[in-house]
Amino acid sequence: MAIIFLKPKKDKMINKIWSRLKQTFKPKGIKSFKENQAKESAYDSRKLGLRKIPLNKIVGSVGRYHDFDSTFRLKEYLPHERLEGIKKVMREGRPIPPVQLYQIKNEYYVLDGNHRVSAAKEFGLSEIAADIVEFIPSQDTLENILYREKSEFIEKTGVADSIDLTEVGQYAHLLKQISRHLQWLEGKDEKPVPFKKASEDWYTTIYTPLVTIIKKARLIEAFPERTPADLYAYISSYQWERGGTRKYGSGIDQLISSDMEAFREKMVNKKEFEYPEMLRKTTSFVLMHVVAKKEEKVIERLSALKEVKEIHSVHGDVDILLKIVLTRDLVSSDAEIIGNFVHNRIRQIPGVTSTQTLIPGFSKIREEGVE
């Protein structure tokens, strides 16, 4: 009796465990367009036409999302004849027609051509020709507003989608900048210039050089939640539109012309390796007081700092005189960079009791051999 009573409970437990294991290891499928469309309230659409689309951005299907696994492989229990036929055509190098995709933000869903996408992914291709219809998210979240602004910017300009801004209204600011550039081109060439052609010239000769300078200067490290495009918008606005004065970072004026077209003329024939560095060296002198009989040990520690260029043990009100040379970016202040170095590197040396920093306002250095 005991065995008969326990057996159903044991079978029930085993079935429950097996069911959980099947759910755990069940292969995930591709995304459903309709589910994401409802989630994003993306019902307004527009045709974008034929484009090359990265295959890794095709994440789902409109009607056949149950038929493919997460890597877009057709599931084993389904007929493979059509897929094998498409793979044969591709192996022979014959062209295949563009697929039809629906787009929501940066994701694409297959309306027609699921097998072509599956074959292309299996062959390791990076992109595929596609006819695109974009569905626009209507909810007014920050992400969606920025996406709509970016989409409008790309549609009007035709430039690459690598310009990522994090503040609402900045894409409109760039469009105004391009409009001014268009007027300059028309005045220079004395003939009408299409907006997309002016946009391409702006992107190549103005936007890209300045963004490259910003990246080389590693300014983005000081603004971890911003993008290079954000810094471009900020710097170009100050330099070319607001004409505002800065308490710090005036060295930018020597590097980046105060006129946008003057900057273009300066950069248009330069190669990337010729772009100027957005870095400057700043020199200062530090007067130090140290504990009696600690001078030699302090000087030894100072000698290990590459920023310290000269060390002088002096007699009088101070014990040691230093000359330090620091490198800073153009949006930082001398006072901030020097203050941080003196506090964090010099004043932490055991035996240093106090320091006084002198920042030259003007320097003239006599060259060797010149009397």
Image (cartoon, rainbow, N blue to C red):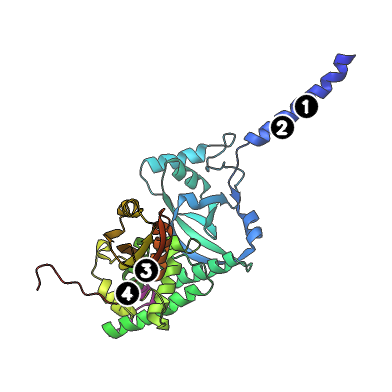
- Callout 3, which amino acid? Thr
Residue 321, percent from left and from top: 30, 64
Which dot, 4 or 2, sits closer to the camera? Answer: 4
Disc sitting over residue 169 in the figure: none
Give the SS element for disc 3.
strand
Residue 188, percent from left and from top: 27, 83
* Label 4, label 2: how far apart the Cα atoms are: 66 Å
In the rendered view of the protein, which quadrant contains the C terminus? bottom left
In the rendered view of the protein, which quadrant contains the N terminus? top right
- Callout 2, which amino acid? Ser
* Label 4, label 3: how far apart the Cα atoms are: 30 Å
Which dot, 2 or 1, sits closer to the camera? Answer: 1
Residue underneath mark 2: 19
Disc sitting over residue 13 in the figure: 1
Q: Say whether disc 3 or disc 2 marks the residue closer to the N-terminus.
A: 2
* Label 2, label 1: how far apart the Cα atoms are: 10 Å
Give the SS element for disc 2.
helix
Q: Say whether disc 4 or disc 2 marks the residue closer to the N-terminus.
A: 2
Residue 137, percent from left and from top: 60, 65
